[in-house]
Each structure stands twice: as structure tokens, then as C-alpha cells.
Image: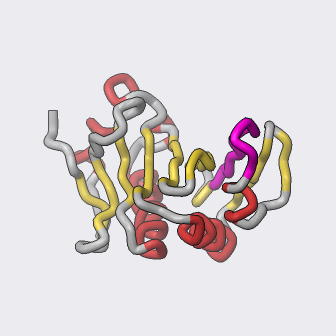
Amino acid sequence: MADLLWDDVKDLFDPHTMGSLPDLRVPNTAVNDWQTLLDLVVERGWEYQYSEGGAAAPLPRARTVLSRPADAECPELRVRPSGGVLAIFRFYATDEIDFDVDLRELQGQERLDTLCGFLAAIGQRLGKPVLMDPEGDCGHPVLGFDVHTDRVTRLAEPQ
């Protein structure tokens, strides 16, 4: 059974009201959490591309990428947990894993199930919540993976 039903959450996936690129995050992380995420991507066989300054590069160890100079361009990791769904991770800080998804790609039950599975895989491996905030409205999650219930749940009241 699906964590969420499309009809119950489709308002959270409206690019016109939520912004097309919501902010997803795993709070309270450390370098080892980032490395666990990188290992998960490889273990799951998810398609990915790591780049620095727009140039593709081999996937480094988390400690290496997170210890870059402060003035260096922020690297990104593009992950496709399935065709048509893209998550873009940016290595802004050690203490929070940040990534974006495009709501225009996440329409309908099948794509919602893919997103829920992806968030659950990350949350289960890290033992931490994975939260989705509206674009530019960090700190007000509308849905997320709950470690205690082991599922993705709606966190915001319907509009």
C-alpha cells in the first residue's frame, strides 16, 4: 500500500502554489551521514552524476567534497531513483543534506510512490527524518519521512 494517496496530497505538488522546486532536507547531519547517502546511491544502482563547476567528475568521498575551500563552487549530485524523477543534491553544509526535486516531474500516484520510496530509503538508512518544504519556505515542512512510523506522511493541513 502507498504511503500517500495522490488525491490526498496533490495540492502539495502544485508548482503554481508550492513553487516548482521544493526544498528537501535531512536536518542534523554529519559527514558520515553524507557518506551513507553516497553509499546508498551506489548500492541501490540509482543513476547518478556528480559534477563540480558544471564538469562531470567521479563521485568523491563525502569528507573530500565537504572540505572544499569556502570560495569553491558548490558541487552537485544528480540522482534518478527512477526514469523521469530527478533529485539534485547540493553540498552546502555538513549539518544538513539539501536537495531539490521538480514538482512538474512528480504528478500522479506512480511518481508520488517513487518519491515516497526514495525519501523512505534515505530516511531509513540514515535513521533521520527527510522533510519537504515549499520552495523558499524552509522550516515549514509539508510532508516528510517519519522515522517513528517508518513512512512518508503529510505534515501540513490541506488548504
Q: Residue 123's spot in the image, x, y percent?
A: 42, 68
Q: Residue 45's spot in the image, x, y percent?
A: 68, 70
Q: Residue furthest front?
A: 70
Q: Residue 133's spot in the image, x, y percent?
A: 35, 41
Quarter holding the C terminus is: top left
Q: Residue 93's spot in the image, x, y percent?
A: 56, 50
Q: Which is nearer the eye, 12 or 141?
A: 141
Q: Which is nearer the eye, 134 or 6?
A: 134
Which stretch did the figure color magenta?
68-79
Looking at the rendering, which quadrant does residue 2 occupy? bottom left
157 relative position to 93: left or right: left
Q: Is residue 86 visible from the viewing direction of this image? A: no
Q: Residue at x 41, y 28 (%)?
A: 19
Q: Which is nearer the eye, 24 or 46?
A: 24
Looking at the rendering, which quadrant does residue 48 occupy? bottom right
Quarter holding the N terminus is: bottom left
